[in-house]
Amino acid sequence: MGNGVQESPGALTQGELRPVASSTSQAEGSKMGRNVLNTLLSGALAGAVAKTAVAPLDRTKIIFQVSSNRFSAKAAYRLIYRTYLSDGFLSLWRGNSATMVRVIPYAGIQFCSHEQYKRLLGGYCGFQGKALPPVPRFLAGSLAGTTAAMLTYPLDMVRARMAVTPKEMYSNILHVFVRISREEGLQTLYRGFTPTILGVIPYAGISFFTYETLKKVHADHTGRPHPYPAERLAFGACAGLLGQSASYPLDVVRRRMQTAGVTGHTYGSITGTMRLIVREEGLARGLYKGLSMNWVKGPIAVGISFTTFDLTQILWRRLQQRGFIQG
């Protein structure tokens, strides 16, 4: 003390090493891990609720997509009614178990990766914690959709097969995998993969871009950071309408390629499949077959999905604030 310099409580003596402040980084890592888990679960729930709600319409759309029969609202109604009379009410949800096996990881990965891509692109562009500019906003959605599609594609293949075949052909999801692998080869599980990825880029990009943009415009004009649930449904419906319309021809192509093994057709490439469809069925009636039904089911499904995800996230944050779950 005689040197006039007061020693602070945190001062180090000679040869002493300051301990590494690892508790803060561990806490941040733990918080990030919980946030990732939250978005995964919220996305999985959103996808499951949305797809189950529109499963009969989705199954009907796929049946028309993979056949040469002309689509109309009357024909779709007749197909649904005949299916109900012959196989019962629950048959309208045939293939929905395969849909759930696919859509739960798909939606969870898509929503979770979208949040992570937004965070990464926001930090890169200098918009951390703020709404992204248009191009990164579109890019985040496209990357999220591509990531989810790449990781879950065989499940989509199985779901398409179950939707268009009688229940006697495949008894369960595992049976589909076994029969396809044994009779057609493992590579068949990735048939239609390229048009799927090419289609999901505009679909997911436009969907997330439109939804995030409408929320931003709404907040700017109303001063309310959180839209009402009905407004979220409307924003999601617009997003689904635009996204699915932009990518629909590629959706038809991938369904044809996925179900070629049970429909008796052979499709070798994307352009070849498109040419064959146009030559046999026409442009609008072929590549856009079932689009009008998609305009009904698509906006409903996407609206429910986005709304469920957002409301689940809000509920999670409120539970954290009230101490029911660890923040």
Image (cartoon, rainbow, N blue to C red):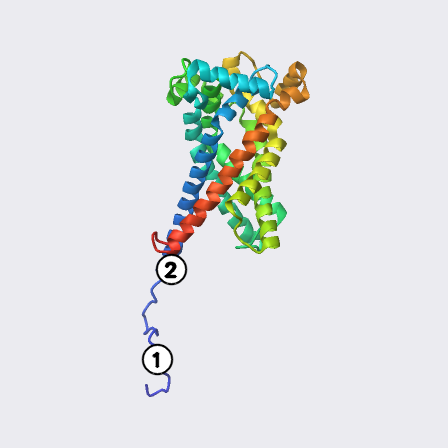
Q: Position of residue 114 (x, y in %)?
A: 51, 43
| Closer to viewer: mark 1 or mark 2 | 2
Residue 189 placement (x, y as % from top left): 47, 23
How packed mark 2 is, by other alpha carbons closer than 10 Å (few <14, some 14-19, many 20 or more), is: few
Q: Quadrant of residue 274?
A: top right
Q: Amino acid at mark 1?
A: Glu
Look at the image and tell me in which quarter the N terminus lies. bottom left
Q: In the rendered image, which residue does mark 1 sit on? A: 7
Q: Is residue 166 visible?
A: no
Establish if 159 lies above or below 139: above
What's the amino acid at mark 2? Thr
Residue ID at (42%, 38%): 45
- Front one among 98 and 140: 98
Is residue 217 visible in this depiction of the protein?
yes
Identify whether 134 is placed above or below 301. below
Q: Nearer the viewer, residue 32 or 327?
A: 327
Question: Residue 76, image x and y in percent?
Answer: 55, 20
**What secondary structure is marked by label 2?**
helix
Contact (CB < 8 A) between labels 1 and 2? Answer: no
Q: List the residue tagged with mark 2.
A: 24
Sort mark 1 into few (<14), some (14-19) or many (20+) by Cα contacts within 10 Å: few
Which one is in front, 255 or 188?
255
**Left or right: 272 with respect to 314?**
right
